[in-house]
Image (cartoon, grey):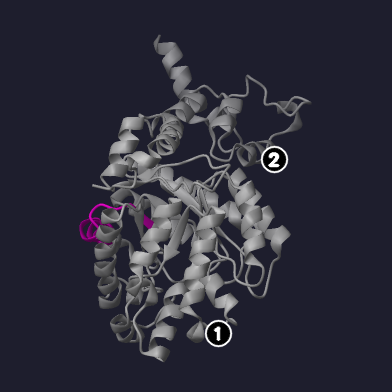
Amino acid sequence: MNTQFDEARSGRITAAMHAAAKKEKTTTDLVRSEIAAGRAVLPANRNHRNLQPSVIGRSFRTKVNANIGLSTEQSDCPREMRKLTVALAAGADCVMDLSVGSDLAKLRRQMLESCPVPFGTVPIYEAVCRTGGKVESFDPEALFEVIREQAGQGVDFMTLHAGILKEHVPLALKRKAGIVSRGGAILASWMRRHKAQNPLYERWDEIMEICRTHDVTVSLGDGLRPGCLADASDRAQFAELSVLGRLVRSCRKGGVQVMVEGPGHVPFNQIRMNMEREQKICHGAPFYVLGPVVTDVAAGYDHISSAIGATAAATYGATLLCYVTPAEHLGLPTDEEVREGLMAFRIAAHAADVARGLKGARDWDDAMTDARINFDWEKQFKLALDGKRAKERFLKNRRQKNVRASGAVQDKLDHCTMCGAEFCAMRITQNISNKKS
């Protein structure tokens, strides 16, 4: 039983659960029971003042996260703030700031003030930046200082790579692609240089106290996630997963909410096994997956490759999908690439919700079908995941005579330019039905 919601905090937590239940169109009792069982999390730091809480778990709609943030070679604070605006407008359920560089606290403060959805970070990035930027010699004390500061600022969930241990590193070095997680690589380098154990693992009780104090949800990072198909489902990945299972039990015992991060690059036929294995080893904790990417050759289109994997992952066990943009493996994403990544993953999330029979999920699709068979174009644009783009695309191929001066589609327009009036199957079907009646 998760003791996160004790009596001392029950009023505030109940309000957050009620708000999340209203958003999901479900009951507060269901939200409460799923969180208590550890099958769902409600990332809601008491210091995130403008938060509109969302619940993440299998009993609820699959959520999508957007990663943004500065790199050491590109972007600036105004540009990343624009990306935040784009991500929220495109329907991101969560946002993570993966920034590296200087003065990160200032940018994070601005983001938190502008972000009404759960907000996450990876504290080890800032810790390395504070100690000179050399990954093999960062100061563990700086890492714990960053965790405390970010929790105090209002960060709702943190990726902590506590499951990668020094004994796992030799396994990872035998891989084709090695270690592709930034946090995992930093810790592996530090452990090898200092011949010491992962400080996050060794001082886990300190982390529990910080997270419990501020109601920060732990997101157990997959520092040994596979970075290519050849490395998927290997000994290194599953050795770390076993440790993550133990840490899940520790979080629940300590009254801290926890979810688990998952792979990376996985052949399509291995996705179900990976999801089911995580559910078993991590005791039903919510699974937060990056993709997974199902082929290594889709550079420039990895938002599509990974959305294919994400649909399967969410069908078989994942509850939070971390988007991938067309810039994956190539560079920092632009504003438009952030939007494209989110749209691809919102499609994946909804397709999975329909596939797993989530109550009410297909109602959206059925409403769209009604609008289509009635040639109700404006209703279709309203229902479309990206209605603005759908309308723009429709109008682009219509002759001006079919469009009012205001830009609205004529009510009697009963076909599109794909088939034309005479070859429109739905129009033909309606004519058959009318003659039959």
Q: Residue at x 67, y 39 (%)?
A: 392
Quadrant of residue 62 in the image? top left
Position above or below: 224 against 254: below
Residue 225, horizontal then vertical, whole percent = 37, 71
Q: Is residue 154 left or right of residue 350?
A: right
Residue at far top of view: 437
Marks 2 and 1: which is nearer the front? 1
Camera sees residue 95 = yes
Q: Which mark is residue 134?
A: 1
Going from the N terminus, do you reach mark 2 or mark 1 first? 1
Residue 403 vertical position relative to residue 300 in the rendered view, above or below: above
Left or right placement of residue 303 versus residue 107 in this view:
left
| Tag 1 secondary structure | loop
- The answer to which of 423 and 287 lies nearer the viewer is 287
Percent x, y of residue 34:
29, 41
The magenta stretch is 272-288
Circle 2 Cα neighbour tier, 10 Å, few/some/many (<14 / 14–19 / ≥20): few
Image x and y of residue 5, in percent: 34, 43
Judge whether residue 275 is colored magenta: yes
Q: Disc 2 marks which amino acid? A: Lys
Residue 293 lies, with reference to residue 369, above or below; the image says below
Q: From the image, which quarter does the C terminus lie in?
A: top left
Report the label total: 2
Residue 358 visible within the image: no
* Separation of residues labelled 2 and 1 (CA atoms): 52 Å
The type of residue carrying mark 1 is: Lys
> 375 or 326, which lies in front?
326
The mark found on residue 227 in the picture is none
What residue is disc 2 on? Answer: 396
x, y (%) of residue 395?
Answer: 68, 36
Name the side, left or right, on which 122 lies relative to 352: right
